[in-house]
Image (cartoon, helix red, strand yellow):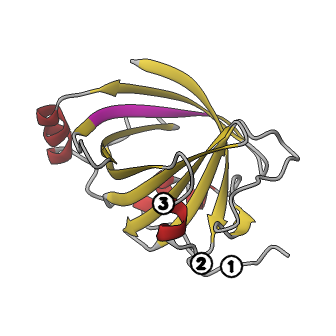
Amino acid sequence: MAEQLEVERKFLVSLETKTIEVVSLPGTVIKKIDQFYLHRITDGVERRARRSMVLTPLVMSPKYQKGEKVLISRSAEMLNRDEKEQDITEDKYWDFMSIRDKSLMVIYKDRYVIPRNNLKYELDFFREPLLLILLEVEHLPQGVNPNPPDCIKIIREVTGDERYENYQIAAGKCPGYAEQKTLT
């Protein structure tokens, strides 16, 4: 099982962001992701399975993974989690789907991975369970503002707000744009 420390900041992005502009950015990779959660066996440990497919003109083969995330620390400025992922077979994915936590919804999103200024920007367009766009930037130092391409309009940082984490989105606890506050 591959293990890594996930250090990220997360931002709510305007629905006015257009995928056609994002796709045209140099080096952008598009992934379709379906993700669901398994029942928790330990407090603070999220267990999930996902199917992701990189969209390229030549190949569209799915990748299946099982993962766990353990919260290390959370603040308004930074989220630190221990993340473990392992590749699984398609059959195992469907086995997990049959025993998933049905109190949580399945997440369907399109991820645009954008390399920029030696950072990796992950722009997630959620299709279900709600319409939402979030930007994640890994290893962005505290106090440093992200510098996304002009076509990505950040509304506000939501790093410390657990309601914008995937698990809470699947639980139906994300307010979406109801509490929108525009950065000026």
Would you say 41 lies left or right of 184 here?
Answer: left
Residue 144, image x and y in percent?
85, 47
Query: In terms of secondary structure, where does tag 1 sit?
Result: loop
| Amino acid type at mark 1 | Gln
Which corner quadrant of the image does residue 25 belong to? bottom right
Q: Are marks 2 and 3 in contact (CB under 8 Å)?
A: no
Instruction: Read off the residue under disc 3.
Output: 23
Q: In which quarter of the image is residue 58?
A: top left
Q: Which of marks 1 and 3 is in front?
A: 3
Q: Can residue 104 be seen in this view?
A: no
Label 3 element class: helix
Residue found at x 28% / y 49%? 57
Q: Residue 177 carries which label?
A: 2
Viewer-side residue, 22 vs 83: 22
Label 1: few (<14), some (14–19) or many (≥20) C-alpha neighbours in 10 Å = few
Question: Is residue 157 or residue 164 the one in the foreground?
Answer: 157
State whether residue 101 appears in this view: yes
* Residue plotted at (76% across, 78% down): 182
Q: Is residue 174 magenta?
A: no
Residue pointed to by mark 1 = 180
Badge nearest the viewer, 2 or 3 = 3
- The chief SS type of the magenta part is strand
Cα separation between marks 1 and 3: 26 Å
Q: Which of marks 1 and 3 is nearer the N terminus?
A: 3
The answer to whether mark 1 and mark 2 are in CB contact below 8 A is yes
In this picture, residue 110 sits left or right of residue 114: left
Tell me: residue 77, above or below residue 45: below
| Magenta-highlighted residues | 64-71
